[in-house]
């Protein structure tokens, strides 16, 4: 019986319907006879739920080299390769859900050869119970081998090359061009008539040594390569190419090579533009760095100039204070010496009166000496850093300022922890302290405060010395308080250049790694200085 191919699907459907509608628990022999008679050119198999073969037709047995009795009752898995086991199990699961499907499957012959089949499978139910799967197997081995042979032939590669969007060449074993695709002509402008059957190295832009070396290695040793060209002039414009070389595998004994040319001109030009912008940015950054360094140097020089001026102003003010402090003691000493002469001339000089006036004169001269020593201490720069007791330096600063406080009737109170030790430049810190206290004295005098007071405290907290200089001069307005540490800022009409607090801040922050802050209080002002410190523990 000959079946019309166009109606084969209808016959299979009819057979499946007969099998599905049969109410017997076993498929009757006449059903299998009908299958063998109807599907004589196709394989037919039924398996139970455990993948055991319940029926296999003679056509499939003949293709696989088995007798029917050899396979009926055995596992279907023995006919497949291992990698197919999992897939068959998954497909069987779909059968149990009532789904039909088509797929390709590899079966093994008795001799161990592989044959390729297209399978149409459907579930097998009787009285609503799933009994297994039936499948129709179409042998596509010859078709598959034809496709594989084509895929490994030079004709196949030529067909693929002509349809590639990338420029492509096929070379023979000697490096002659045997195929050029349209994309290569479009990209390079080189026509096939000028290149076919000619050496690939005759292409002008491949004359560079690195391209010749790569192609020679490909032809001689089948070493693949992947490289980018420099700027090539084609079509009177710039062209950049990404070139890759491969060895082609074919079923014949001939050797062929495959070159692929990707036009990367747009990307390369963008990269060059980005590189140029990056270079410009780097040049700009370098210029800005040089400018910043130059500005920093200028600012540093100005900073040193300001500090030098601040030091000069401090020394000038100290000299003014020395002159002011010395005037009264010198007058007193002069008067005492003159009174000795008067007492002698009038005969009133005796030993007690002489000793009294000499002791008074010596006391005045000692005061002058101490004042001079304090001035000498404060007017010289420290050469080296060292540990010093904070209380001793505060005392030296206050000795210089006590006469000013005394003449202005200012009460001074102190609460200083004598064990606090600080590392740094003691003279520079004393100068800074003098500047801060002088600011308080000037405020009290200018505002003519009744019962003027200055308090100095120094306490140790969390590895820091906290020094607070307070006054009751009424405080500094908020808009002015933000500027008090700026250079040349002053609210007083005097010769001072306004560098005292600026210098004090620089000394505390730069030389001691400390902080200085201003805080307005109900009575006046607090200047809070914080310095790294430790507590001295004596023997």
Image (tube, rainbow, N blue to C red):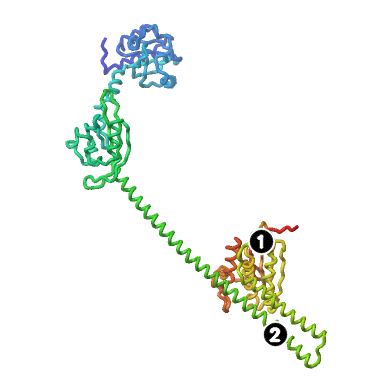
Residue 41 shows in the view: yes
23 and 201: which one is in front?
A: 201
- Tell me the quarter of the picture where residue 253 sits: top left
Number of the label disc, if any, that sits on residue 483: none
Q: Mark 1 points at which residue?
A: 387
Pointer 1 local density, CA inside 10 Å: few below 14, some 14–19, many at least 20? few
Vertical order, 533 against 346 (above or below): above
Residue 127 shows in the view: no
415 and 232: which one is in front?
A: 232
Query: Residue 179 at what x, y percent from top left?
Result: 22, 32
Pointer 2 local density, CA inside 10 Å: few below 14, some 14–19, many at least 20? few
Task: Identify the residue at horizontal 69%, vertical 69% (top origin).
Answer: 395
Vertical order, 172 against 478 (above or below): above
Q: Name the residue under label 2.
A: 331
- Residue furthest to the bottom: 346
Q: Nearer the N terminus, badge 1 or badge 2?
A: 2
Task: Identify the residue at horizontal 37%, vertical 7% (top origin).
Answer: 68
Secondary structure category for the residue under label 1 = strand
Secondary structure category for the residue under label 2 = helix
Query: Residue 141 at what x, y percent from top left?
Result: 31, 18
- Tell me the quarter of the picture where residue 207 sits: top left
């Amino acid at each position: 019986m000959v079946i019309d191919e166009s109606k084969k699907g209808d016959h299979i459907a009819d057979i499946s319907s007969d099998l599905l509608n049969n109410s017997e628990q076993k498929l009757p022999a006449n059903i299998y006879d009908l299958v063998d008679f109807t599907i004589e050119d196709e394989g037919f198999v039924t398996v139970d739920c455990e993948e055991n073969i319940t029926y296999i037709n003679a056509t499939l047995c003949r293709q696989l080299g088995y007798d029917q009795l050899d396979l009926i009752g055995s596992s279907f898995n023995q006919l497949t390769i291992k990698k197919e086991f999992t897939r068959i199990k998954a497909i069987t699961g779909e059968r149990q859900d009532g789904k039909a499907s088509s797929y390709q499957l590899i079966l093994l012959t008795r001799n161990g050869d592989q044959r390729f089949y297209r399978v149409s499978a459907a579930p097998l139910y009787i009285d609503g119970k799933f009994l297994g799967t039936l499948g129709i197997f179409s042998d596509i081995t010859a078709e598959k081998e034809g496709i594989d042979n084509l895929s490994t032939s030079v004709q196949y590669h030529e067909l693929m090359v002509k349809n590639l969007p990338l420029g492509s060449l096929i070379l023979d074993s000697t490096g002659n061009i045997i195929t050029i695709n349209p994309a290569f002509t479009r990209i390079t402008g080189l026509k096939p008539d000028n290149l076919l059957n000619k050496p690939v190295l005759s292409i002008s832009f491949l004359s560079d040594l690195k391209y010749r070396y790569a192609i020679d290695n490909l032809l001689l040793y089948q070493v693949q390569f992947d490289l980018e060209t420099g700027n090539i002039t084609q079509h009177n414009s710039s062209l950049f190419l990404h070139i890759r070389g491969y060895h082609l595998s074919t079923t014949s004994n001939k050797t062929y090579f495959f070159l692929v040319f990707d036009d990367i001109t747009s990307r390369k030009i963008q990269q060059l533009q980005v590189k140029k912008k990056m270079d410009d940015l780097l040049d700009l950054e370098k210029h800005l760095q040089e400018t910043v360094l130059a500005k920093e140097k200028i600012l540093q020089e100005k900073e040193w100039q300001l500090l030098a001026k601040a030091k000069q102003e401090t020394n000038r003010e100290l000299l003014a204070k020395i002159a002011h402090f010395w005037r009264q003691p010198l007058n007193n000493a002069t008067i005492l010496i003159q009174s000795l002469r008067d007492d002698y001339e009038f005969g009133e000089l005796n030993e007690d009166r002489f000793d009294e006036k000499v002791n008074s004169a010596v006391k005045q001269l000692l005061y002058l000496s101490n004042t001079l020593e304090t001035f000498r201490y404060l007017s010289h720069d420290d050469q080296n850093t060292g540990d010093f007791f904070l209380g001793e330096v505060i005392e030296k600063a206050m000795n210089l300022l006590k006469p000013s406080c005394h003449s202005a009737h200012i009460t001074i109170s102190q609460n200083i922890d004598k064990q606090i030790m600080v590392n740094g430049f003691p003279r520079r810190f004393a100068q800074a302290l003098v500047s801060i206290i002088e600011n308080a004295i000037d405020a009290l005098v200018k505002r003519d405060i009744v019962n003027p007071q200055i308090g100095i405290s120094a306490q140790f907290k969390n590895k820091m010395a906290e020094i607070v200089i307070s006054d009751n001069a009424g405080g500094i307005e908020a808009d002015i308080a933000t500027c008090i540490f700026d250079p040349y800022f002053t609210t007083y009409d005097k010769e001072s250049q306004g560098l005292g607090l600026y210098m004090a801040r620089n000394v505390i922050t730069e030389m001691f790694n400390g902080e200085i802050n201003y805080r307005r209080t109900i009575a006046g002002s607090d200047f809070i200085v914080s310095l790294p410190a430790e507590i001295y523990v004596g023997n």
